[in-house]
Amino acid sequence: MSEYRLEMRNVVKAFPGVLALNQAQLKLRPGTVHALMGENGAGKSTLMKCMFGIYHMDEGEVIYEGNKVEIKGPLDALNRGIAMVHQELQPIPERSIGENIFVGRYPTKKVGPVTLVDHDKMYEDAAKVLKEVHLNYDPKAKLGSLSVSQMQLVEIAKAVSADCRVLILDEPTSSLTAAEVEALFAIIDELRAKGVSIVYISHKMDEILRISDEVTIMRDGQYIGTWEAKELTTDRIITLMVGRELSNLYPKRENVPGEVVFEVKDFTSINPRSFRNVTFDVRKGEILGVAGLVGAQRTELMEGLFGLRAHTKGTITYKGKTLNISQPKNAIDNKIAMLTEDRRATGILGVLSVADNVSIASLNQYLIGNFMLDDAKIEKLVQDNVAKLSIKTPSSKTQIQSLSGGNQQKVLISRWLANDPDVFIMDEPTRGIDVGAKYEIYCIIAEMARQGKSIIMISSEMGELIGMSDRIMVMCDGRVTGFIDGKEANQENIMALATQFEK
């Protein structure tokens, strides 16, 4: 009897223009958490989608519980006891929590000659599985009434409901609060104790070193090796992932902040529970970090400044000129750009090409007459950005949704750089991106600041804020609670301001 519950051997998977997996492998032991790590585009999610039956391997084999198997699709995988919680959620918000948990495999009952969904059993079983993962949700409530992080936990309940023996968690904490992460880790510990084999994909080094028993590292679609987690350090993992030493996680910056160019005064949302009386300024060539806990209204504030949310009072001034921004077009016309927090939901146009995504915000620059687009100029724009930002794509015609997260993010940055913005709002610019791609994006941000552009950067990563910001503005419950010079910033003084609630 093999010591492994599941083995993937010599897996090859190709897409048009891309060899995504090249002789990849993975071996899972029962009752362990096995971290799968690598840069964006290393092939981690592709390998898991082969295991779960979403993709069919071109070559290779899967040995499951001692037998060679062919997993024909996700339902086949679930029936075998293999479940997956995807990084990008695909909820059905208008249906109940119970229906989402059992979608595609509803319990049924016979009423005469007709087979119907047994709703009573479905909700009874949903209540049991929610209780099992310590979620106090009404299974009859609409899924859409939950937050994104709560939906993520329901997805985990859905996987547990399949009585899985292998559970794949792809970036499971990307939308979770610190308390929810602790709750997830408690669930993982319980599943591990029951003998479940867990594959854990994350870019968060502290999580990997804390929760994992073994770590497999991939690079460029290939298997690099497997180590016991206790043998590894953050620096060692980074070196193995990127194939080179990263002596510093943050680039040396040569920007010199100048005069104040962008001012916001007394800015207040139309929603009384959102941002209020916000006043701050940004200098030319400055990186202003924005810190705060979940619910601090940082994103809402920036969306208000960009014209995505209404405000009742307050002024925005650029170089002494008062701006009237009631919609994004007004912001764009005034050389303001915004990289949104969720690239999948509000950033990329998934089914369109890389070229379409780069040029969509600046098409008026590429018109021939009133109706025709100059394809040659657009192609030059794309190729210039591919070279300048090191975007990995088979061609400009490739659908953007097929690129890795880091390359999608670079394409979105290219979209706004095509407009040559003076003020660039960046909301979580490195979320869900591996350490190598993060460094490249940090270099892009540093270069923009060196060129004199004003950067406003929201981040939930303390290290990122401290490592990249000239100043940090801290928010709590919709208010600005203070500013910290970048050289004096540390976790303690940021958290002190981030928890300064009104009494």
Image (cartoon, rainbow, N blue to C red):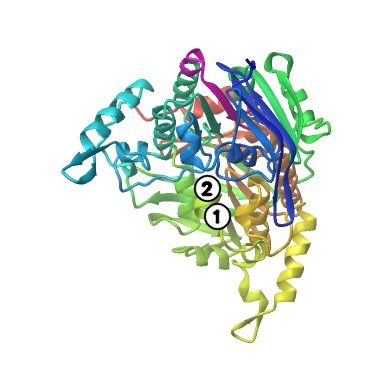
Q: Position of residue 489 (x, y in %)?
A: 63, 29
For disc 2, the marked residue is: 342
- Tag 1 and tag 2, C-beta contact below 8 Å: yes
Q: Nearer the viewer, residue 245 or 494?
A: 245
Q: Is residue 288 above or below residue 462?
A: below
Q: Position of residue 213 (x, y in %)?
A: 63, 16
Q: Which x, y percent locates residue 249?
A: 74, 33
Q: Which mark is residue 347?
A: 1
Q: Is residue 95 visible?
A: yes
Sequence-first tag of 1 and 2: 2
Which residue is depicted at the point 79% across and 29% down?
239
Kindly state the secondary structure of the residue where label 2 is placed: loop
Q: Quadrant of the C terminus?
A: top left
Task: Give the residue furthest to the left.
Answer: 112
In this view, 135 is above or below 391: above
Q: Residue at x 29, y 28 (%)?
A: 125
Q: Nearer the viewer, residue 282 or 409?
A: 409
Q: Residue 451's image quarter? A: bottom right
Instruction: Indicate whether 130 appears above or below 268.
Output: above
Disc 1 versus disc 2: distance between alpha carbons? Answer: 7 Å
Q: Which residues are magenta?
A: 190-205
Seen as rendered, the residue at the extreme right is 244
Residue kind at label 2, given as amino acid type: Asp
Provide residue 311's location: percent of width, then percent of height: 39, 55
Q: Residue 42, located in which quarter of the rendered image?
A: top right
Secondary structure beneath dot 1 equals: loop
